[in-house]
Structure formats: structure tokens, C-alpha cells
């Protein structure tokens, strides 16, 4: 299974030291150039030097200078690269960009779904420790959403 990734999920998985899950769950992860540029801008802010392992997975777009209204360049390129590469899924967390992608019949999943898959495939045993790290590191997931995922996965809620 080939997945195209936007910036947010890569940063979220990196800040909890779980980027390797992408390589375990998916056959190949590809990244558009704009996402790579956004990652490079965030390496020091989030202390995520481990993203450099994905540099070989950066793919330039064939179509240039296309902008999707209301969506940043990284998200736009992720959507377009998905379409160009005939990928299986788009890894994206931004709600507005995800809505745009789904309107284009793109199969999307987010960071939390990756962690649920990792638990199902027994790469991790519990979600809660990672969700606590998201909250501590001020990642943008609501406690309500995190608790809903924990409940669906038969785990105790966050305090």
C-alpha cells in the first residue's frame, strides 16, 4: 500500500518517536516537495531530526502552479501527488484539506488512524501513552476526540 503524506501527521508521529510505524504499516510513503520544505522548517521547532530518513521519498509534482482554494501548499501538493501517483491513501489531518480530498474521491486517513492500525497490527500495545504525549506537546488533537478513539479501542479515557 502506497501512502502520500502531508506535514501534520509526519510531525505528530515524529514528536512521539513513532515515525517508524509508517514504514511498518505501509509499503511506501511518498512526500511532495512542499511537505518536505515544511518539514525542514519545523525540524528545530519540534526537535524532529528523524524525518530526514524520508528525504529519499520526496517526489516532485508533474503539474506545477496549481492551487486549491483555502488549502496550504503542502496539503495541495499532497492531494495532487496522490492523484498523480495513484496512491492508495492520503495521510492528512487538516479537516478542511481532508474534506477537499474526500470530495475528490481520495481515500484519507489521519495520524490517529495510523496509531489505531499500529495497535491492531500489534506494533504498539496502547494508544493512551501516545495521546498523553500529544497533549503534553500541544499537538492539535482535542481531548474529546482522543477519548472517543480510546473508547472505541477499549482503553481507559484520558484524565
Image: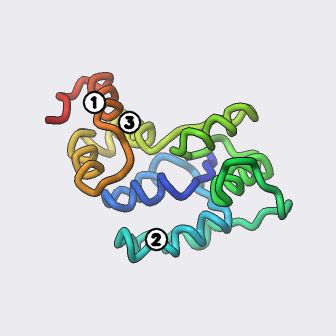
Q: Which residue is mark 3?
A: 116
Q: Which residue is mark 2?
A: 42
Q: Position of residue 36 (x, y in %)?
A: 59, 69
The front one of 139 and 156 is 139
Q: Position of residue 33 (x, y in %)?
A: 67, 68
SS class, disc 1: helix
Q: Is residue 152 above or below residue 8?
A: above
Q: Which mark is residue 147?
A: 1
Dots 1, 3 in contact, CB < 8 A: no
Q: Quadrant of residue 49?
A: bottom left
Q: Position of residue 25 (x, y in %)?
A: 47, 46
Q: CA distance from mark 2 to mark 1?
A: 28 Å
SS class, disc 2: helix
The residue shown at (46%, 71%) is 42
Local crowd at mark 1 within 10 Å, few (<14), some, or many (≥20)?
A: some
- Left or right, 29 with respect to 152, comes to right
The front one of 8 and 69 is 69
Amino acid at each position: 500500500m502506497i501512502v502520500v503524506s502531508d506535514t501534520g501527521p509526519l510531525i505528530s508521529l515524529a514528536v512521539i518517536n513513532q515515525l517508524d510505524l509508517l514504514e511498518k504499516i505501509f509499503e511506501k510513503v511518498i512526500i511532495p516537495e512542499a511537505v518536505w520544505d515544511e518539514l525542514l522548517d519545523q525540524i528545530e521547532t519540534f526537535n524532529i531530526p528523524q524525518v530526514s530518513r524520508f528525504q529519499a521519498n520526496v517526489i516532485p509534482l508533474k503539474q506545477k502552479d496549481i492551487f486549491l482554494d483555502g488549502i496550504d501548499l503542502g496539503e495541495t501538493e499532497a492531494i495532487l501527488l496522490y492523484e498523480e501517483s495513484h496512491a492508495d491513501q492520503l495521510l492528512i489531518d487538516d479537516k478542511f484539506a481532508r474534506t477537499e480530498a474526500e470530495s475528490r474521491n481520495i481515500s484519507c486517513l489521519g495520524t490517529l488512524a495510523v496509531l489505531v492500525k499500529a495497535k491492531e497490527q500489534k506494533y504498539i500495545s496502547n494508544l493512551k501513552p501516545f495521546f498523553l504525549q500529544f497533549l503534553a506537546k500541544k499537538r492539535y488533537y482535542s481531548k474529546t476526540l482522543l477519548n472517543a478513539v480510546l473508547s472505541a479501542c477499549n482503553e481507559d479515557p484520558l484524565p
